[in-house]
Amino acid sequence: MTSSPSLSAQFYQLGIVKRVERWLNAPPHPALALEIGPGHVAAARWGSARGALETYAIEPLPAGAVMPSPVDANIPQPDAVRAAVRKVLARVPDRGDPIALLIPDAVVRVFILPFETLPRRSDEALPILRWRLKKSVPFDVEETVVSWTRQNGRSGALEVLTAVARQRNVREYEEAAESQGASIGVVLSSTLASLPLLEDRGATLLVRMSGRTLTTVIVNGGIVCVYRSSEMHGDPATLEPQAMLDEIFPAVAYYQDTWGAHVDRVRLAGAGARETLFHKALAEELKVSVGTLADAPDVSPLGSSAKDLIRQDLDALVGWELNEGA
């Protein structure tokens, strides 16, 4: 999504060949992705060969510099964030091309909306989507940016995967990058950027922590079946595994009831030094294989550099590369 009217918003639909669903006239896939997260600013530039990482950089942020929220101000320490962006882009220059800007999940609300029909024209679809979202978001839908893509639900019925964010909050992140000379081509939440790392076969549960935000996604055969993002009482260093399980159980139960099936595997991201502890808890409770995003089959062809990024919790930068599609 983007709040700039001169740019197009886009969503990415998973599939066997990672097909890209484009809304309006989507811009070219930027080779450089910049992520502004709650604890860091990072960037990666990808080469012309798929999965070829040219260079990357990461800069830590002081505590409280970025406080992701769908409603409140997100960047209370703009000077610190701009300084980190400047250092990162000095090591990974944008070369004057538009970049992909990845922002925290907490800024973007994601919904899976059932429809009998929805107009193909964006100017006709947007008012309908805003009307459907009016009671579901904690802000005025008229001051939002909205992106969407169509998908088929379990019975083949139309579903619309929709992301909505308050325009002023998205602009905080855009301005932090633009202040250092960057031109924004695409804006996407970090978990949406990471989704192409998941397997196409069967049902995969993604459990992803970023700061205090826990995002739970279930993808089955390229369809996003469940998307849930919640603010937890602690970050991965302090969060108890049971608190994480209590948060994901409703998502798993909903999937089982709605789709009549169980998840086939779990991918865990952002657990940091306590990864083994969370891994064990998930495996014991769900009775399925649990691995990290670095273990996903589509990551292996990208080489060790991509895996190193994922192990540093920069999976969104790698997922962005796979988002290019076929």
Image (cartoon, grey):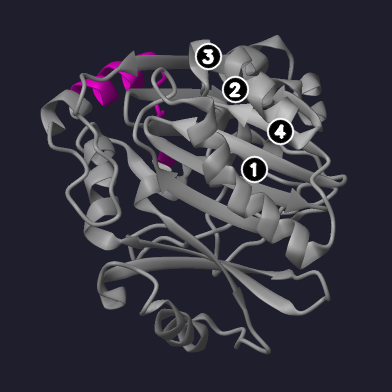
Rounded to the nearest angstrom, the CA distance separating label 2 from label 4 is 11 Å
Numbered disc in front, either 1 or 4: 4
Q: Residues within 10 Å of mark 3 (few under 14, many from 20)?
A: some
Magenta-drawn stretch contains 85: yes
Numbered disc in front, either 4 or 3: 4
Q: Are marks 1 and 4 in contact (CB under 8 Å)?
A: no
Per the rendering, the mark at residue 278 is 2
Going by the numbered disc 2, the residue's amino acid type is Phe
Specify which label sits upstream in the sequence, 4 or 3: 3
Q: Are marks 3 and 2 in contact (CB under 8 Å)?
A: yes
Residue at position x 71%, y 78% from top?
Answer: 158
Specify which label sits upstream in the sequence, 2 or 4: 2
Going by the numbered disc 4, the residue's amino acid type is Glu
**Quarter of the figure with the N terminus:** bottom left
Left or right of 87? Residue 301 is: right
Going by the numbered disc 1, the residue's amino acid type is Leu
Left or right of 116? Residue 194 is: left
Residue at position x 79%, y 53% from top?
Answer: 220
Q: Which residues are magenta?
A: 83-103
User: Residue 1 or 224: which is nearer the viewer?
Assistant: 224
